[in-house]
Image (tube, helix red, strand yellow):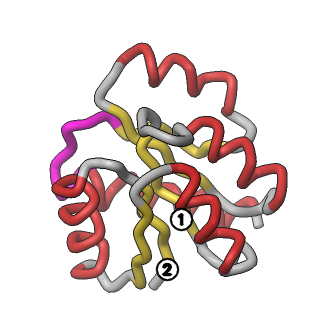
Amino acid sequence: MARILVVEDDDSVRDFTARALRVSGHEVDTASDGDAGLARVAASNGAFELVLSDIRMPVMDGIEMARRVAANYPGLPILLMTGYADQRERATDLTRIVIDVLAKPFSLAELRASVSMALRAARTVN
């Protein structure tokens, strides 16, 4: 399975998402904001197969983190998630670096389907 970084400031959403992905067989690391997520990506030298990040977070939001990750690790796939329509619209200019935006709240089935789709899309491109 894949090595995935989950970046989410809400503890319950981060824990649910990480647990669900681990149960699906993925290796999961987590970060609580975009700055910490960017640091995890750098520490691994971009060795994740997918970054799954919330958009709206303190310190550094997911959109800024996605831009920085893409600048430093251009092949690293990014899947964003948000519960805010205006944040989803902010991500539309990132179509070249973000695979998709998963709407919150999401079900376990929706999470698994989005992650599977993102991993397939990334493998097709790479």
Decide: marks 1, 2 in contact (CB < 8 A)?
Answer: yes
Q: 10 Å neighbourhood of mark 2: few (<14), some, or many (≥20)?
A: some
- Could you tell whether 87 is left or right of 36 in the image? left
Residue at image point 55% right, 65% down? 50
Of the numbered discs in the image, which one, if any, rests on residue 75? Answer: none
- Establish if 87 lies above or below 48: above
Residue 106 location, x and y as percent? 21, 43
- Give the magenta-colored segment's residue range: 103-110
Residue 35 location, x and y as percent? 58, 53
> Of label 1 and label 2, which has the lower sequence position?
2
- Establish if 14 lies above or below 84: below
- Could you tell whether 23 is left or right of 81 in the image? left
Mark-to-mark CA distance, 1 and 2: 8 Å
Residue at image point 63% right, 66% down? 39
Residue 27 in which image quadrant = bottom left
- Could you tell whether 14 is left or right of 74 in the image? left
User: The N terminus appears in which quarter of the rendering?
Assistant: bottom left
Indicate the amino acid at tag 1: Leu
Residue 68 location, x and y as percent? 74, 48
Q: Secondary structure at mark 2?
A: loop
Disc 2: which residue: 2
The verdict on residue 104 being magenta is: yes
